[in-house]
Amino acid sequence: MSEKSFARYNDEKTTSEMLEEMLSRKRSTAQRRWRILAKALMGSQESVSMNAEDDSAEDEVSVRRFTSFGLLMVARTEKPATEPDSTSWYEYSTVLENKLFTVQIRRIKKNFTANELIGFNNTGNICVWPSEECLAYYLLKNRQICQDARILELGGGMSCLAGVIAAKYCDPRKVTLTDGNATSVNNVRSIVARNGMADFVECGVLQWAKAAKMFRAARSAKTFLHPQSNGLRIKSWTGSGKDAWKILEKVYDVILCADCLFFDEARSDLVETIYGCLTNDGVALLMAPRRGTTFQKFAEAAVKRGFVARQIDRYDANIWSMHLELLEHSQEYCPDLHYPILLELTKQKKTPPG
């Protein structure tokens, strides 16, 4: 073998090894991501959480030790005799400005099948995450954001806590609560009924990949025009999901999303779904921890899509104070995993030049 051929062989071997290493790392990352649900699959009651998505991290999954900022008091409450053993009801409450705010939330305990986990993140069925708690509390203290607004919550999990609180106390015009999992959505329907909001709150299964595909197809075809001023909309639903059709044919003034940014595979679909569902001059409020670079990557993808993005670390004095206290006194608290940052996305109305 000539010297030149030998060098080329080594280059090809090196490239091949690099590709194999990258593929192996990708497979390993995917396995670690789904390990967050392993205990749920096996029926374990121990909570789990995902660590930062960092290539240098020894393991991306850890026991979920930090569970709440204590913003809402949680007390178990009586459930109807007809309720299955796999469910339990809790009262979430807080007092602000000498006024009591309270909602009834049903939790579910379920052993998930593999089929239920394919295609979307199911971690919202395991517990209520701190980001949901913080977003709900933030909306209670800034109720004017949702007043007389059409609200959509994406990826609300088994509770849609933020959307339920907005519906009950923020005087919205209409509220739509969604998740990609039918188990979550059915549970949220029970929550809505128990809180007496079924007349103006609707619930539906919405998976971002399917929604994004429809929006991209509509934008590419440039044939389906919606009477709203934000341009292309889906005029007909060719799939089998009636829930999705009802959701996607409308536009929303405010979109809520808590702790949904840590899956790389869903990033572009979530951005596209938010953009397609949000009316011009509407706002999306997303709360999530940084988790390595996942938060920043999502913000960058949103800006690239056309949003004006504003990242707010100190969005509430009480939450920030608790964050500082936890930093000083709690060994279990890790800001990168536990402190939610508020990402405010604004969809600006496009005006013709001149």
Image (cartoon, helix red, strand yellow):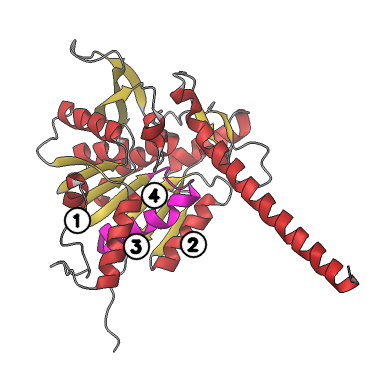
Determine which residue is flagged by label 2. Answer: 300
Q: Where residue 189 sits: x, y (%)?
A: 20, 32
**Disc 4 versus disc 2: nearer the observer:** 2
Q: Nearer the viewer, residue 172 or 9?
A: 9
Question: Which stretch is magenta?
Answer: 258-283
Specify the quadrant of the image occupied by residue 116. top left
- Label 1 residue SS: loop
Which residue position is annotated with label 3? 346
Q: Secondary structure at mark 2?
A: helix
Q: Residue at x 30, y 27 (%)?
A: 93
Q: Which mark is residue 286?
A: 4
User: Which three-letter amino acid code belongs to the residue tagged 2?
Assistant: Glu
Residue 238, label in figure: 1
Of the numbered discs 4 and 1, the one sitting upstream in the chain is: 1
Q: Is residue 226 magenta?
A: no
Circle 4/circle 3 CB separation < 8 Å: no
Q: Nearer the viewer, residue 76 or 127?
A: 127
Q: CA distance from mark 1 to mark 3?
A: 30 Å
Q: Amino acid at mark 3?
A: Thr
Mark 4 or 1, which is nearer the eye? 1
